[in-house]
Image (cartoon, rainbow, N blue to C red):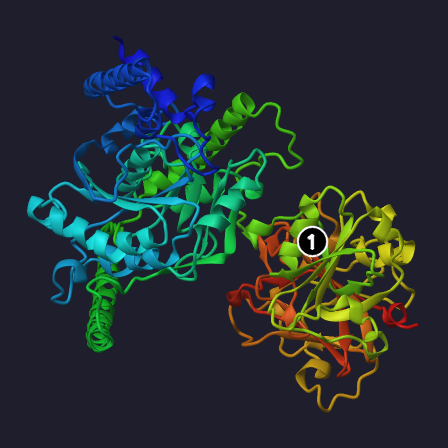
Amino acid sequence: MSCSYLLAVCALLTVPTILPETTAQHHAAPSVGQGVSLNDFHDSHRSTNSTAAQQQILELEHRVRQMQLELDTCQARLPSRTPSYVSPTSAKNATHLVHSFASASWPSHGRRLGNAEPVIGICLGSTSKSKKHSASGFGGIPLFTVLLPSLAKTIEKGFSFRVYVGVDSGDKFFDDSSNEEAITKWFEKHVASAATKQGIKVGLKVLIFSNPNHKPGPAFNHACKTAYEEGADFMYRVNDDSQFMTPFAKNFVAELGNRCPQNIGVTGPTCHEGNTHILTHDFTHRHHMEIFQEQYYPIELTDWWLDDWVTHVYGAEHTSRVLDVVVKHRLDAAGNMPSSTLHRSLQHIVVVVVVVVVVVVVVVVVVVVVVVVSSMFSFNLLFACNFVAGTRYQVNHNAKKALGKLQQDGNDAIRAFIANNFSKADCTVELGPVSNELRVSTAPQFFSRIPGVRGIIVQANGSASSTSGVEDEFQCSHICHMDANCDGYTWIGDDTPIMINAFKSLVRLVTNDKTSNAGQCFLFDAEAAAKTRRVAYHAKGMSGIKSGRQSSFPPRIRALLVPTDPTQKADLSSSAIRVSFGGGKVDGWQTDSGQTNNVAKNPATDQSAHGTFGWNCDLHEDVRSRNVPGYSPLKNNLQILSRHDKCSSPRWSIKLRNGVYRVIVGYADPKETVVAEHCRLNDYHATDGSAVSGRDFQFHSFQQVQTGFLNFEGKYSKRCTSIAYIIIDDATHYFSE
């Protein structure tokens, strides 16, 4: 029997097992989410009196065992496969498995069968070389002090978790047969036992493999490939010193599920340590392995640029960082140092740094003297240095040179995969080119394409359907997004009962269930939408109309909830204030070029007129006029919010008469990704959650001014990078009888 035939037969084991029609008449079908294994299939027939059926099952099981033995023999003979999109010279970085062992909770079969819950393979590399500070055994290895304990606290029902740990052969702790039992027992005690009580399956497999170069890239690739071959639906590449601060499974799976085509792309957590402009941890579907021929990362990249490659290869529209999933990179984890030990270590580091500085100064002086003397005698001195302070690996310059081509080749491979497998996918957003943009996603479980407007609620008139206990505005928007009959929504949080006094009579909009910390979600079908007449201000309320359903609402309501084109004056009142930030002028707009003004510096004593604006500190050095073709002047001009932290807390203020204003904040930058994660407008987040980063997006809201000022605040280093324009239009008349 040929190896190709055996591979094809075993591949069939990945598809759901279907009971024969005659059997289905005697046995209940498995419930949704319940897997159907060969043993289950056998047990379901054991109770019958059909000797022929039992004999058939025994013969099938015997044949499967025989084929598995022959398949193992064939795979052992097969040469290692090198992906077609990488160069032959990268074969030197290839690895092979030497030995592996797994916890008792490891599943008996690799591939999931039937409708079993999705499997997430958590893939990483680890080493016992990180043991420091006299720590012994498990206490000195971050895998056991950081990663696995945090995993035990953040796993979620509805998924199976398998941890794949790649370890270099020869590791003194992991590659010691006398430690295998202790490792697996530790895992069962500290991780698996608690998970089992919750009805969650979790297992650990340690992969001892050859890695002559001792680099992390091969470890990641080997762990991810094993996870893929054993049927994992998703791969989550992390580090052994990664600490999961929040659950991740539901959010990540939902984020990839929202892509088009579905599950094409990469996402990852929010990690405040290290480079925040790339994904330092990444989560993908098994499609990723199929696209790149079972190599998670290009073999050419062994340490540096792995994160850069995966962050950029899918393009901006299929790459994201999930705001609500947080990972902490515990660089201090080796040895699990107590604070006193860490303090003493820091003292030692300070002493060493002082000594090094002195030595460097002496060396520089000597070098200068030598160069001067050598120049006098016409000597030629060549100096070569290739050292990066504070890094474990020297910069791989050859990999850096190859990065661009690897990303482009990868992007081409993704396009080819989509064309071959998703040719009929009707996607409004197609795969983009290689991009250095990293977008931020919020509440992916409650994905919605309905643009939300903060600060406004719509009167329901008793005709809209209502749902209590909705978690937040994102869930309310999602419910409407998924309901074909929903044309729009209004969400009101119980924790913010702030309304204009004239509209406190609209009590029917507010839930009476004060025991809930959630809110009230109102959905409007076409009939209910046509009956809406009035709106009210609510500081944290949100409303939105589904695209293409605007005509269901009266013009008065529609004018407030449909996003406004900033270039269309007809959508604004004659008194609207329009300010463009940056170094260039925009016709019809006032210009703010980063100058200070008393209205922001000393608001308590300021006597400026209505409409006066400025900054609390000088930001004129951070204004930009990009002049990038294809972008309007309005979106080519912007104010960076103190890139080099010269201003500790940048704040822009404008003097306004008290009242309610429609405010549109525009974020745009043709050259860099704008991040508005922590931008604030009058002490509220200046994003609606649907977009918190990108090259061109807006935030629409209604703001109540009670102190005579409207303030916009943020800082580049605190993930509020820039602002392009702002529109302020008096809307008080909308909220009066």
In front here: 361 or 192? 192
Identify the residue at horizontal 82%, vertical 79% (top origin).
501
- Indicate the quadrant where residue 369 lies: bottom left
Q: Is residue 383 visible?
A: yes
Residue 191, placed above or below residue 215? below
**Quadrant location of the N terminus?**
top left
Residue reaching furthest to the front? 49
Tell me where residue 555 appears, x and y as whole percent: 91, 54
Where the C terminus falls, by quadrant? bottom right
Q: Is residue 366 left or right of residue 469?
A: left
Write the residue at 71% across / 86% down.
603
Report x, y in % for residue 17: 41, 25
Residue on which disc 1 sits: 636
**Within-10-Å neighbours for mark 1: few <14, some 14–19, many 20+:** many
Does any portion of residue 668 appear in the rendered image? no
Which residue is situated farthest in the left direction here? 178
Residue 306 vs residue 528, the one in the foreground: 528
Q: Residue at x 29, y 39 (%)?
A: 223
Q: Nearer the viewer, residue 637 or 126?
A: 126
Considering only vertical position in the picture, is 628 above or below 300? below
Q: Quadrant of residue 347?
A: bottom left
> Where's residue 720, x and y in %?
58, 64
Q: Is residue 129 left or right of residue 432?
A: left
In this rendering, the count of numbered labels is: 1
Which amino acid lies under the numbered mark 1 shown in the image of this protein? Asn
Point out residue 366 in the picture as x, y percentages from the top left corner: 21, 65
Residue extending furthest toward the bottom: 605
| Secondary structure of residue under mark 1 | helix
The quadrant in which residue 286 appears is: top left
Task: Say left or right for 34 vs 638.
Answer: left
In this rendering, position of residue 69 left or right of residue 710: left
